[in-house]
Image: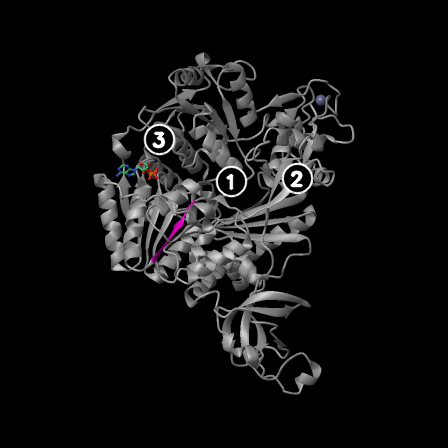
Amino acid sequence: MVRALDPSSRLLFPDAGTTGRLVGVALDVPVDTLFTYRVPPSMEERARPGHRVIVPFRRRRRTGIIVEIQETPAVARVLDVHDVPDAEPVLGADLLELGRFVGRYYGASLGEALAAMVPRGIRKRGAGRLRLRVRLAPGVEVPESDVPSTPPTAPQARVLRVLAEHQERGLLLADLCRMASVSTSPVRTLARHGRLTLEREREDALAAAAAEPAERQAPHDLAPEQAVAVRRLTEAVEGGTFSPFLLLGVTGSGKTEVYLQAIRTCVEGGRQAIVLVPEIALTPQTVRRFRARFDRVAVLHSGMTEAARARAWQSIRDAKMDVVIGPRSAVFAPVPRLGLLVVDEEHEGTFKQQSVPRYHARDVGMVRAQAAGATVVLGTATPALETWRHASEGRYGLLRLPERVGGRPMPTVQVVDMRRGEERVGRGRHIARTLSVRIREALRDGGQVILLQNRRGFATSVACPRCGWILECPDCDLSLTYHRSHTIALCHLCGHETTCPPVCPDCALPALKMRGVGTQTVEGELAETFPEARVARMDSDTMATREAYEEVLGRFGRHEIDILVGTQMIAKGLHFPRVTLVGIVSADTALVLPDFRSAERTFSLVAQVAGRAGRGDAPGRVVVQTTLPDHPAIRWAAEHDYESFANAETLDRKTHGYPPWRRLLRVVVRGKDERAVEARIDETARRLKDAAVSGVALLGPAVPTVARIQGRFRRHLLAKCPTSREVSALLHVLRTARRPARDVEEIWDVDPYQVL
Ligand code: ADP
Ligand code: ZN
Ligand code: ZN
């Protein structure tokens, strides 16, 4: 019930004013209502929708966003806002509306949605994140091995040894911790004892690349298919109405050149362009390609300090930037007049946020572009099947670039059946005969090699061959991965680390076996088989920051490395003309996961990594090792035939009722008390079932593949819905239900990217 405020309530609430405008404020809390505050007359001028306000909330100061001016308060007790800090609103009407969509569609509160849109440096005041560079202090003795005498302790010794290998530039704190497998505490202890130095750093390679004057690059003369694509996009941008396109171009077909020329039209027409790229593809090289054509380029990325982000945000809002490049959150960049949205590698999972609000930047981008009358280009060699369906049914314009630039051939792909006798490898070997012959040839001819093994570490499990004991994480239901470089076993979910026991703790057998293959195994095997080759490994163990990643890529580009071994990190977007061979050590890893997208992901991974071969003058070769050579994902990837794969896989999804034919809503419940978790998921399932929304099929509740993470038990269920209307009806049921018990968490994921 709405009740006008009785002036006498001032006696009850002395901190509440009686004059001044009432505003509805969205706060970053999981509550669906707006909160009413009163703006004192002195600040009234600035209290408009889209403005930030500092308000008292549960005895604390919180930052919120004004979303409406209210006539009468919905509640009796109205508190005053403390402050309206900015002269300008942080969100315009268009972004407020987009926030409403995000909240509604993904089941978040409006406050949670808006909080994801506004950079924290703007939301909160205070210092930004600083980068710390660590160096060995002069004259410090570096211990030979991990001697656990004090000091230094074993972790400290590891820190010193890793640093000793990077004397010249030192390492960023995050890289150092990752490479030495330590927390920051041994580093800080060593710094206190004067054995190393910590230095604050503000320089940011990406921001520098965006700011530094770039050498002008004239547009390329377009290949015929590129010209067609550019012409259709140009017409759409000039038309100024919402027009979505899929740019289906094989790797190396010159998609970026198409983006650049379409952006030119957009900028010349006085509108702005946003370019979304997967986080990993956001490199200074990428930024420089845009800077070589446009002066006013802004970069938004996760490594930025909050202050830098706030500055960039402001210059974008003030129309001082023509092009904004960034990962998923850049879809909210406050450009005043969006003309073109580019989503590069639109199939990438990193466009889906894995925390509230669990939005997909491509899909949110579509909604924003629709409201803005903008053109959208989704560019990729391997579209998500959702996108493919839109394009093949004519809702998106389809632009094809079937050939590589300059008439370069696609690499030849050889699928090697690892079950065949002549490929059989010895114990502990993973690079079979064919691949090893090809590596030898490539090295002999002066080429470079990229090897993909989509799992980091050394052995994927440590087990007892006699009694079956397996070294598991005490907090997660997952076997630990052995990392040889530091002789530790690590949990890939929670980071728990332990030393490997010398004997089986159950039956005392002194011969535990390592099973499975990770990047470190492959690296070790290469060192034995090709002792003369220079090998580097690239995975999240070695690459904690962008800087470490770029350092290795720089060395690879200068041919100081012959073979680069890595996880999917090396599959994406790299352009190294001297790479003549790409090997996939095992294409099976992703295929066998019980997830409806595993075939799609495998196809994409094989196609993307294969796309790294033969980008220069020498033709490329790809060797794919697998025990499932007839799987459609592998067969069609070897033929570079996305469309045949997509059509076959789309049919399969139809049979099983998955996207792009159904919309999914996933509910995950997690908590430390297994019975409470079970009770909650059962209750939620019952509630969804009782709602009897027509056409909805409920799967579960079930125990997910990983039943426990970081000591929290998990249960999940999946609702397959005919359209997003039913998803929204189910969300409504979830949102109006009573909240879970304390220590039990319930997650709603609309259009989940993965369901493991
Ligand atoms: P994709 O993004 O499709 O993998 P890129 O846009 O990275 O491909 O293009 C690959 C290379 O070809 C780049 O070095 C680019 O500068 C170059 N390139 C693109 N279009 C042309 C063209 N029309 N003529 C000559 N070179 C081109
Ligand atoms: Zn045993
Ligand atoms: Zn764990």
Residue positioned most to the front: 138
Q: Which residue carries the number 1 mark? A: 546
Q: Which residue carries the number 2 mark? A: 197
- For the residues labelled 3 and 2, the Cα–Cα distance comes to 53 Å
Tag 1 secondary structure: helix
Magenta stretch?
A: 272-277
Location of residue 504 with respect to 350 vertically, above or below: above
x and y percentages locating residue 503 in the rendered image: 73, 21
Residue shown at 66% from the left, 26% from the top:
487
The amino acid type found where label 1 is placed reads: Arg
x and y percentages locating residue 198 in the rendered image: 64, 42
x and y percentages locating residue 632 in the rendered image: 38, 31
Location of residue 448 with respect to 665 vertically, above or below: above
Location of residue 386 with respect to 180 vertically, above or below: below
The amino acid type found where label 2 is placed reads: Thr
Q: Ligand 2 is located in which of the four quadrants?
A: top right
Q: Which residue carries the number 3 mark? A: 636
